[in-house]
Image: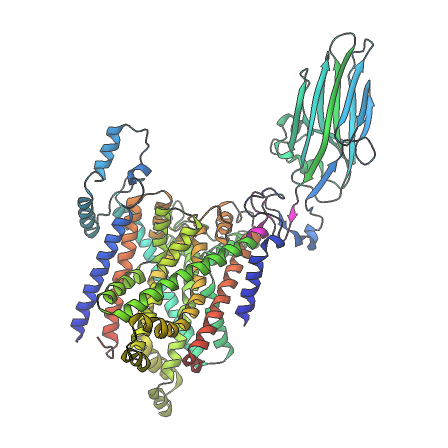
Amino acid sequence: MLGAVILAIFVLVAVFAPLMTPYDPIRDNFIAEPFALPGWYVIFPQYRDYPTNQVFAIEPTVDADNWVATVNGSIKVAGTSRQMSIGFRTTSQETSVSTVELAHRIKYNWAPPLTFIIRFDWSVPHLDKAAYELDIAWRTPKGNTYVVWTSGFSTQTVDKLSVDLDSKGTPFPLKTDMGLQWYGNVAEFIFSEKGTYELLLIFKFQPQVDGASSASATVGPLAGRFPGRVHGVLGTDHIGADLFSQLVYGTRISLIIGVVASLIAVAIGLLVGITAGFFGGLVDEGSMRLVDVLLVLPSLPLLFLFSGLFGRSIWNLIFLIGILSWPGFARVVRAQVLQLKTATFVEAARALGASGSRIILKHLIPNVMPLAYATVALSIPGAIITETALSFLALGDPTTPSWGRMFYSANAFGAFRELAWWWIIPPGLAITLLSLSFVFIGHALDEIMNPKLRARR
Amino acid sequence: MGFREYAVKRTINAILVLLIVATLNFFLFRILPGNPITHLINPSMPLEARTAMMKLWGLDKPLYEQFLTYLVNMFTGSLGVSFSSTKPVAAELMERLPNTVLLLGSATVIYTMLGIELGVVAVSRRGSSTDLATVGLGLLTQALPVFFLGLLLLLVFGYYLPIATNNAINFPLAGTISRPPPTDTLGYVLDVMWHLALPLATLVVISFGSYVLIIRNLMIDALSQDYITIAKAKGLDERTILYKHGLRSILPPVVTIVGLSLAGVVGGAVITETIFTWHGVGRYLYEAVLSYDYPVMQGTFFFLAVVTIVANYLVDLIYGLLDPRIKY
């Protein structure tokens, strides 16, 4: 009963995987900070103010919700929903720099982030005897301003440039300006306190010669993000991918592998066992020698060889696991068939002139099927564990989101060093539970089909 | 049929199986697309260098000649030369064998003893909480994958424990011996045992589960025999009945099970050796597979297969000796 309930839960998880998690387990990377803690960690006091993903979007308009412009010099700013235009024009013999500071307020009330990411498009389509510079900066609640990106002074027009700013890539000179070492974390340093921060885009224009000069620049919509330090149900891995979605989709793969591989094994076992038992003679001798060989061979090293020789696609694995796990069952079936062959009802059928195929189909197969059901259930965990072991050893299919792949990456990419138990224990528990459920079901089936066993208990 | 005939039959069978495995092992490596040499030699190498290498490894001869050389090599113990390290495979195997024997041997002894002891204790108090706990533990460790247990032990004892105890207890994370190894004998032995602890624990816990359940079932059968009732009626004490009458009668099947489970234990040892980077035969095979080192793959696999076949053969013989009731 318990087994059936656990199995039902796993099957539901496998079927409804896309509903349970919005992320693709393989392709969606950098969803949050690498090694983000599980989301429910915030119930512990020391992690209470850890941020989940903090996203902000700024429309290119001039209003209190978006950009607040502070102009110093001969600059006009006008925003629409598509882009903001910044026009610069001097008529007199000015040589001083004109600046416009576009400021956007952001409340940051969490523990310091490890990274911030800012993306937007900008351009400088028109330049006439003028130079420009664009800086991106943060102003802290205390009023310090830290420049995190700069275009440098330029006299070249640019059609369209994309800023894709990741604070981890802050240039060394800017870090020095903040008083940080080369290894210092800019995001952690700037956002060290809670409060209202201002994101600043600072355009500077300078006339190059005496006389009239002009320039225009545009800024598109801006999207920014503080990747979460806690995320989802099970946090993230070393590339910020969602671990819960990997676990959920892994259920699918494991169930498919287990069921298909053990169906293959049972089918071959039935075929070999029945033919060997029914026809006897050379067929029997030959196939039982083969069974002997396969039974004594260490199957895991053999699978190593096969995956080294034939490649690592998931169907290859399933097929190989299937064709390596039939011998034990074939032997049991053969013994059963030998017994059935001398049973009175089979002899009666033979005496009535039934053909060999009729005896096999009508009398032998129905009588060995109960064995087959229990064997399917009991051999599924073996197949699942074998696949996981191979994937764990980097001999599985790297493009399939299986539990073994989770183990492999956890082991290879520093889950231990980071003490990321949420990466190691959930898939292990899932495999153990799923295997247990099949063991329970198998034993229950065995008991129902073979009443003799019941007395033992 | 007497024991002699039985032994002869088993011997012929074992040799037959050995031959089949050897043939399989050879042809597996010949049905590959391409030539084994293409995986090793840089195609930009000059032709002469490539043919010289072909000759060195005997890959330029016709297939049947390769097969004969292969058979002679395998059964005389020269297993070829590693592609990557250019050392003889047999020498490298011998260097790693003691480590694997140490790991597998001590694990087998411990889980056998533990399984017997726990199984017998569970049976003697059938239905008690000890019995239930043993069965539960057995089922659980049966379902527990070996790599998960290994990683779990590594996480708890290798990472969390040093943090919790402030590095007072520091289990080795990898390797068979410290570098550099301790110079005095006692220190050396202790150091190896310290490294052995986690892999050994992994193997023991994994293997003993199914074992204890089988012992328990066999004992229940054995204790329902008439002679046990007689022994009880005679007023023998419980220990004597359990160990002298019950356990002794189930020893033959237990020996068989130990032999049959050997193939599985070898598989588990490969994984355990890989997790704890134990310098043994299993990890050697694993590394060879990763680097497409065909002679090492072929030689090591053959070696592992021979060991399990021979072990099974010996177990069969011992079974014949132990159990006079056996029908040869």
Q: Give the x, y percent position of residue B141.
A: 46, 65
Q: Height in image: A65 above or below A209?
A: below
Highlighted magenta segment, given as a residue range: A228-246
Whether residue A23 is in magenta: the answer is no
Q: Give the x, y percent position of residue A419.
A: 56, 50
Q: Give the x, y percent position of residue A436.
A: 49, 66
Q: Nearer the viewer, residue B132 or A203?
A: A203
Quadrant hosting residue A221: top right
Q: Nearer the viewer, residue A340 or B308?
A: A340
Residue visible at 33% across and 61% down in the picture: B263
Evaluate whether residue A328 shows in this view: no
Residue visible at 83% across and 33% down in the picture: A63
Q: Give the x, y percent position of residue B118.
A: 43, 73
Q: Nearer the viewer, residue A253 or A247?
A: A253
Evaluate whether residue B232 shows in this view: yes
Task: Say which quadrant the N terminus of chain A sits in.
Answer: bottom right
User: Relative to residue A402, is residue B236 drawn left or right?
Assistant: left
For the stretch drawn in magenta, what is the main secondary structure?
loop
Quadrant hosting residue B111: bottom left
Q: Height in image: A443 above or below A230?
A: below
User: Relative to residue B236, is residue A225 drawn left or right?
Assistant: right
Task: Say which quadrant the C terminus of chain A sits in.
Answer: bottom left
Whether residue A233 is in magenta: the answer is yes
Q: Height in image: A314 above or below B127?
A: above
Residue furthest to the bottom in view is B233
